[in-house]
Image: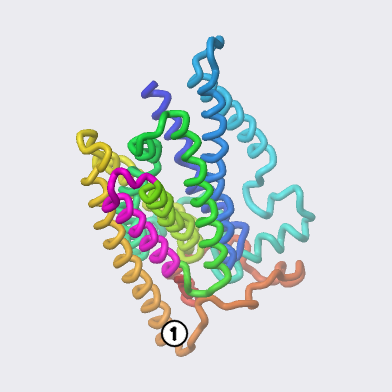
Amino acid sequence: MMVVRVLLGVFESTISPGFTLITGMWYKRSEHASRHGIWYAGNSLGAILGALIAYGCAHIRNGLLAAWRCLFLILGILTVLWGIVLLVALPDTPSKAKFLKPEDRIVAQQRSQRQQRTAKTNKWSCSQFLEALKDPQIWFLFWIEGTGTLINGVVSNFTSLIISGFGFSKLTTLLLNMPIYVFQFIVIITSTALADRFRRSRLIICIAGNLIALLGVLLIRQLSVDNIGGRFAGLMLLMASTNNFPLFLSLISSNVGGFTKKATANATFFIAYCAGNIAGPQLYIPSEKPEYQTAFTSMLVIFIFDAVLLALFRVYLDYMNKKRDREQGVAMNPEPRGVDNVISPEEASNEGTEGVDLTDWENQRLRYHV
């Protein structure tokens, strides 16, 4: 079972970094937040449907297979079938999209490259890799995600345990997961849509999510054990911090130029993500059930710490934008509207960005999204 679980983690590890790279290839920088939100919200939708399927499987009695085996077979078959669909239908790049006309493939390829000047390449660039390791914005994201995921390791993996600690049965606990993930779905879609609607708002929305989640921690930690409704509401509010993840990924897509550098940034980010998920459950001490004071006290500290880091990260990106303005003698809007609209095939063919792969340090005309 342990070997199979490790293999599941190995194969699953490509999903979010891969989707981030794909999103960066297909969409303009101004679209990254909402597009990341749409596919990341699939986690919430999957959790809702998974809870229903698990609830149904839990009622299997005297079957040929145990209930938990049926659950894994159903979810595993669905995953394999959808994987085949993606293998056949998902193009490697916009220029290879069979569902587009040849002239439209050029437009699709160029519309995402007009500002960022980054193209998919199978050639590894050592200079871009080293640049990624020296870039402060990547290390800001590393530490924010690494500490923030300490909470994810608790909440995502132990939501059912927290709910059962409120005194509910196992079957009721499965159903009570659903409203929590419905709230998470709403938070993710709303947060990423707002980030696309209002310029210079991504990190502010991340901070807001952390502060709302901080209120949730206080409700769970400070309310009496008998106040089940209030503590359950606190558990729902904890999910507000999950808006950070797709917005961080959108910042990598929007701000990190160079395909190797972007891939390295993704890898670094997900190393932090995995480390936090490994360490987070250690905060959950069984002898402290059902209050789990260590876990929730740690959450208070982490949410405050991350809010400060997010504010400093925004200050740093603003500083870099103003520094480039001074050096170039021109004040450029870092998140312009209307200048990166869809272009015609004729314009696309004359853009001259085919195969160009510049990092954000090399492309001095780029300004960072915040």
**Relative horizontal placement of residue 208, taking residue 293 as reference (left or right):** right
Along the line of sight, the residue nearer the viewer: 80 or 311: 311
Whether residue 131 is visible, yes or no, is: no
Query: Residue 259: where, in percent of width, then height?
Result: 50, 57
Which residue is at a point 56% across and 57% down the rendered structure image? Answer: 189
Residue in front for this viewpoint, 82 or 113: 82
Q: Dividing the picture into quarters, in which one does residue 154 lie?
A: top left
Is 292 drawn above or below residue 123 in the view shown? above
Q: Which residue is mark 1?
A: 325
Residue kind at label 1, given as amino acid type:
Asp
From the top left corner, tell me how far across and down residue 145 is, in percent.
35, 54
Report whether residue 283 is seen.
Answer: yes
Q: Which residue sits furthest front?
A: 226
Q: Is residue 45 left or right of residue 287?
A: right
Seen at 77% across and 60% down, the residue is 103
Residues in magenta? 203-228
Q: In percent of the image, x 30 and y 65: which residue is there?
A: 309
